[in-house]
Amino acid sequence: MAQFDTIRTATGTRAAEIDEGLRAHMNKVYGTMSVGMLITFAVAWAVGTSPQLLAVFRDPITLSPNILGWIVMFAPLIMVFAFGAMINRLSASGAQLFFYAFSAVMGLSMSWIFVAFTGISIAQVFLVTSIAFAGLSLYGYVTKKDLSGMGTFLMMGVIGLVVAMVINLFLQSPAIMFAVSILGVLIFAGLTAYDTQKIKTTYLQMAHSGDQEWLGKAAIMGALNLYLDFINMFMFLLQLLGNRE
């Protein structure tokens, strides 16, 4: 009986340690994501509210990107693929630095919104996105439903969105942009819940290994995924709800 109690106590202690570790892990994910968001919007605001800086990337009247603007527009996508390829060779601190650099480049790519939309509408859409993101992420964290089956479907949707957006860069069709924006909000809403559950599940599966370096990099990757979900949901909602200048 005493041996059984000892085993039960040890098991309970281990479970409590994992729960505490999970909370710390999720705090790091959300904290890193929040810093990345702060960098992005600080850079976007600094460039978007400076006609001289914005002119480096876009025509100040039409907002059409020049060559450097096109490079900045597609640079975040390239950096995401590069991050995925390099993550195993980077240290946790190196991965974090890469994420913050990515956040700054993303700020450059979306700086035009401070010219195209009113500041009040940007703030309103940011608030709406924050509330929606918090609710969806909380759902993904607490739900007992397995969301893993959504992953393939949602990623196929993202690929379809990217293709449609690239095509519409040349067609400039308002109808296509409207449809893409609605689908984009729905897809990244689903990804927010899916990615949150995946971050939690991955930690629970790997917590027993005790590999803190790997867990540190997993937190950065999780922060990147949630960051992308938030930014994309924000941008699509801005297209739908934002008031243009």
Image (cartoon, helix red, strand yellow):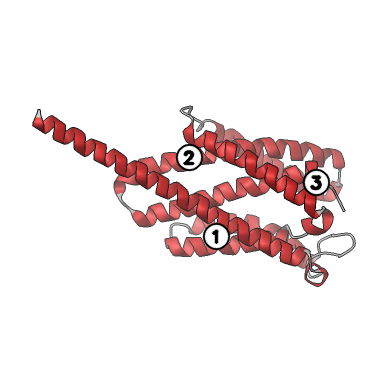
For mark 1, give the secondary structure. Answer: helix
CA distance for labels 2 and 3: 31 Å
Q: Residue at x 74, y 36 (%)?
A: 182
Amino acid type, callout 1: Phe
Q: To which quarter of the image does residue 37 belong? A: bottom right
Which residue has dot 2 on it?
Answer: 198
Residue closest to the eye, 54 or 14: 14
User: Residue 231 at x, y = what percent?
Assistant: 66, 49
Determine the residue located farthest toward the left in the rendered image: 2
CA distance for labels 1 and 2: 19 Å
Q: Is residue 106 above or below residue 12?
A: below
**Left or right side of 30 for 67:** right
Which residue has dot 3 on it?
Answer: 242
First in residue order: circle 1 vs circle 3: 1
**Left or right side of 21 for 53:** right
For mark 3, give the secondary structure. Answer: loop
Q: Is residue 47 above or below residue 217?
A: below
Q: Are marks 2 and 3 in contact (CB under 8 Å)?
A: no
Which residue has dot 1 on it?
Answer: 99
